[in-house]
Amino acid sequence: MSSWQIWLELIINTLALASLLGMLTVGLTLIFGIMRIMNFAHGAMYMFGAYVGISAAYWSDNFWIGLILAPLSATAVGAAFERFLLRRLYGRDPSSFLLVTFGLSLVITELIRQIWGSNTRDVSLPNFLNGVIIVFDEPFPIYRIFLIAVGFTVLGLLTFVILRSRLGLLIRSISQNADMTNALGINVDIIRTLTFAVGCGFAGFGGYLAVPLITGYIGMGSTAIIDSFVIVMIGGMGSFVGSAVGSFLVAGTQTVGNFYFPELALALTYVLMIGVLLYRPGGLFGEAE
């Protein structure tokens, strides 16, 4: 394999991983950017969506059923959690959100362990996603190309909704001044519930899409939440552009690091984060507080 073929493979792998990380992190950014809540249960929602999707795909013998039910299940749990727990905490010490969401992550993880057990879980891909395509005489898994297409499409649609739609305008107005938005007759509670639910849905969606690459396992949520926090710190808290750029930077660092320096790949990610924070304490697209 020539050097340019190696780099082409690294680029495609980076884009595929960045798509997964982007779908995970954009949900966390959506929740923090609008609600100012750092959701420690985000990784657990990622794992929950993955396991629900795996079971749905297994019982229906249909990968696409799992792809639909994974985000829907995480969205439903997120909506219920915001409605019956988080809504009682608005106006209180922000640390209460950290404690409650962390507690939820422990509960969800233990429920998954009790329901599905501790063994790893996998999902079968449809035949047309299970093959390879030849690019410049080099085979590439079709599923990775599929991930890139899905990731860019989903993130593009979310960007359009947030920046160009009336719903996006309402969401952004709440993030800037919730009291004023409420005084204008807009139901802030419903928008908050929708925001938190959709953010959790993105996590569940990304979790299921990750299963064909990493398999489902107890603890995958912990790895996911660490990666997402690193990306948020690099990109800037609450910045959608920062989430996208941070996802590409972390994905590139991990992909290239695993190829050339596998024993240092994880450390390189943290070196990247530290370097960015030393240069810009608020992240690349955030503001230092």
Image (cartoon, rainbow, N blue to C red):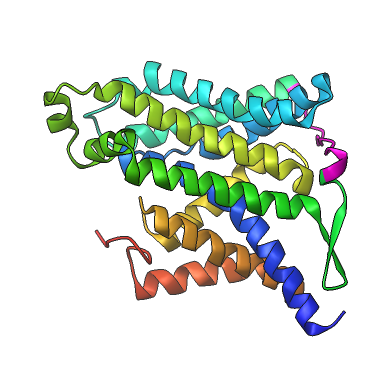
* Residue furthest bottom in the image: 3
Q: Could you tell me which residue is drawn at 25 percent across and 25 percent down?
A: 188
126 inside magenta stretch: yes
In the orientation shown, which residue stands out farthest toward the top?
A: 84
Q: Can residue 66 be seen in the rendering of this structure?
A: yes
Quarter of the figure with the N terminus: bottom right
- 260 with respect to 179 (left or right): right
Q: What quarter of the picture does the C terminus occupy?
A: bottom left
Q: Is residue 29 in view from this perspective? A: no
Looking at the image, which residue is at 74% across and 54% down?
144
Corner quadrant of residue 96: top left
Out of 195 and 166, give the one closest to the viewer. 166
Q: Is residue 18 left or right of residue 89?
A: right
Residue 246 or 157: which is nearer the viewer?
157
Q: Is residue 165 above or below residue 156?
A: above
Our reading of the magenta stretch's main secondary structure is loop
Q: What x and y, as percent, mark residue 151?
A: 59, 49
In the picture, residue 95 is in which quadrant? top left
- Residue 259 located left or right of residue 149: right
- Which span is picked out in magenta? 116-128
Residue 166 at what x, y percent from top left?
29, 34
Task: Work out whether 91 lies above or below 130.
Answer: above
Above or below, 289 relative to 42: below
- Name the residue: 23% across, 30% down: 92
Seen at 27% across and 62% down, the residue is 288
| Quarter holding residue 138 | bottom right
Residue 259 picture location, percent across and down: 76, 72
Residue 2 in the image, given as x and y percentages of width and height: 84, 83
